[in-house]
Image (tube, rainbow, N blue to C red):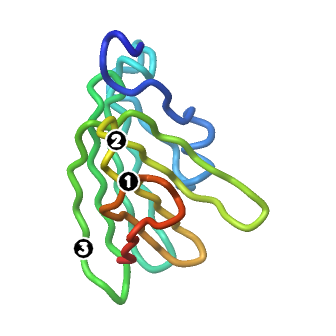
Amino acid sequence: MSGEGGMEFVADLVSLEEFFGAKPVLEYPDLPMQRNSVKIEAELQNGSVWFAFVPFQGWGELRLVAKPFSVVKLLLADISHISVRKTEEDHYLQIRFARKQTSYLELWLRPKVLLFWGNEAPSGEDADLEAV
């Protein structure tokens, strides 16, 4: 897939459903996920989340509505990787970008909605992260 552009790796539909608590919908049911448009809409305890992405084109859109803060809408380009990470302590979605100087975006939905995205290179150690 790397020769065609787009995302090299994408979380599978099962892990996305487990993370969001809602079933992902493929726009074209007869096409494989890598060649499709994937949409997920989930109601949360204190808001909602809507996420859509197209793996072979490397773009996505994320909308969050969470109380007490307001609406967040992000249009994302140059996505190279989407994964769902689950450890004993955490369960989050990570989006990586093709540009080396763009930090990873990380989204937690439980127990509270947290969105982290910084402006430093994704070294993990000295990233300048911001919480929304």
Q: Nearer the viewer, residue 85 or 53?
A: 85
Q: What residue is at 52 percent from the left and 67 percent from the top?
A: 109
Label 1 neighbour load within 10 Å: few <14, some 14-19, many 20+: some
Q: Which residue, given by chain and number where applicable, does mark 2 sit on?
A: 100
- Separation (CA) of disc 1 from disc 3: 27 Å
Q: Which mark is residue 71?
A: 3
Q: Earlier in the sequence, mark 2 or mark 1?
A: 2
Q: Amino acid at mark 2?
A: Lys
Crowding at mark 2 (Cα within 10 Å: few <14, some 14-19, many 20+): few
Residue closest to the far bottom: 68
Q: Which residue is mark 1?
A: 121
Q: Quick one: 87 or 99, which is closer to the camera?
A: 99
The residue shown at (47%, 61%) is 107
Contact? badges 2 and 1 (CB < 8 Å): yes
Q: Amino acid at mark 1?
A: Ala
The quarter of the displayed image where residue 92 is located: bottom right
* Label 3: how many Cα within 10 Å (few below 14, some 14–19, many 20+): few
* Spot occupied by residue 66 in the image (x, y as percentages of width and height): 37, 77
Instruction: Compare residues 41 and 58 and report the one nearer the observer.
Output: 58
62 displayed left or right of 83: left
Q: Residue at x 34, y 55 (%)?
A: 50
The x, y position of residue 14, in whole percent, is 62, 37
